[in-house]
Image: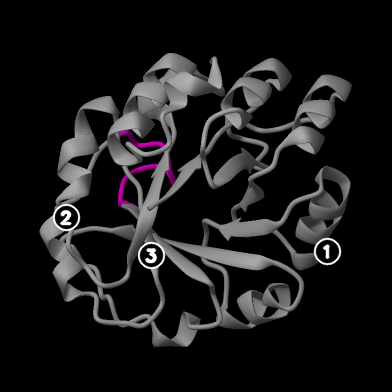
């Protein structure tokens, strides 16, 4: 199971999270977000040391802006959290792994074949904001998805959800994306809570042996 920790912002915290057995570290490039990332030497140093994939999160940003940020921050993956077109996904997929986000409500249409150039879908909860609403959608709706693109699950996930996540049985379920449920403040993650959470989801990793 892949684990993505999103909304990272501070250099020391990024370094601590990078010592955990995660697959993706997410950085938000949206000016209106309290987790928006700005250039700083400490953050760049910590990002350069990450061994996991570095994901840039964007909302309806032009391709040139995304590519400029990707080059500056050394991003491996691009997460599109807005109304981006299949054509933009195709253009970015030539150089980056692409994760396309969809906000799921009770009436969501899981026919997503036009977005098949994305490497992953990410199913988040439909709410007033593009993300970070801190609530779950009805996971039974995932049974309506019959596509071939693997997906990550997001939306209000917290430490108490580990056991229920392990019960998800879907052929395209690839992993999870966590954010506000593990924060002490926007952009600052609780490393100890994440460590305990990952020990349940990935018991063979033994994070206690990493001395963190």
Secondary structure at numbered mark 2: helix
What's the residue at 71%, 72% (across, down)? Answer: 92
Residue 110 appears left or right of 55: left
Q: Is residue 111 above or below residue 154?
A: below
Q: Give the labeled residue for mark 2.
A: 139
Q: Is residue 196 above or below residue 203?
A: above
Q: Quadrant of residue 181?
A: top left
> Where is residue 2 shown, x and y percent of the image?
44, 52
Q: Is residue 212 above or below residue 56?
A: above
State whether residue 184 appears in this view.
no
Q: CA distance from mark 1 to mark 3?
A: 26 Å
User: Could you say which disc has been placed on residue 151 in the image?
Assistant: 3
Q: Give the labeled residue for mark 1.
A: 64
State the predominant SS element of the stretch in magenta: loop
- The magenta segment is 125-134
Q: Quadrant of residue 123?
A: bottom left
Residue 67 appears left or right of 127: right
């Amino acid at each position: 199971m892949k684990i993505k920790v999103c909304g990272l912002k501070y250099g020391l915290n990024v370094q601590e999270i990078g010592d955990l057995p995660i697959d993706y570290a997410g950085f938000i490039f949206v000016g209106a977000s309290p987790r928006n990332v700005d250039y700083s030497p400490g953050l760049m140093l910590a990002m350069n040391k990450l061994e996991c994939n570095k994901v840039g999160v964007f909302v309806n940003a032009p391709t040139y802006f995304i590519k400029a940020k990707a080059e500056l921050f050394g991003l491996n993956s691009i997460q599109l959290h807005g109304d981006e077109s299949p054509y933009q996904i195709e253009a970015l997929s030539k150089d980056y792994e692409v994760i396309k986000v969809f906000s799921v409500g009770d009436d969501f249409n899981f026919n997503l074949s036009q977005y098949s150039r994305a490497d992953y879908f990410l199913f988040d909860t439909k709410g007033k904001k593009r993300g970070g609403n801190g609530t779950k959608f009805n996971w039974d709706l995932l049974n309506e998805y019959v596509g071939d693109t693997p997906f990550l699950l997001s939306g209000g996930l917290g430490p108490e959800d580990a056991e229920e996540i392990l019960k998800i049985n879907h052929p395209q379920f690839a992993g999870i994306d966590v954010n506000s449920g593990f924060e002490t403040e926007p952009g600052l993650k609780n490393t100890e809570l994440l460590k305990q959470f990952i020990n349940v989801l990935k018991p063979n990793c033994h994070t206690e042996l990493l001395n963190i």
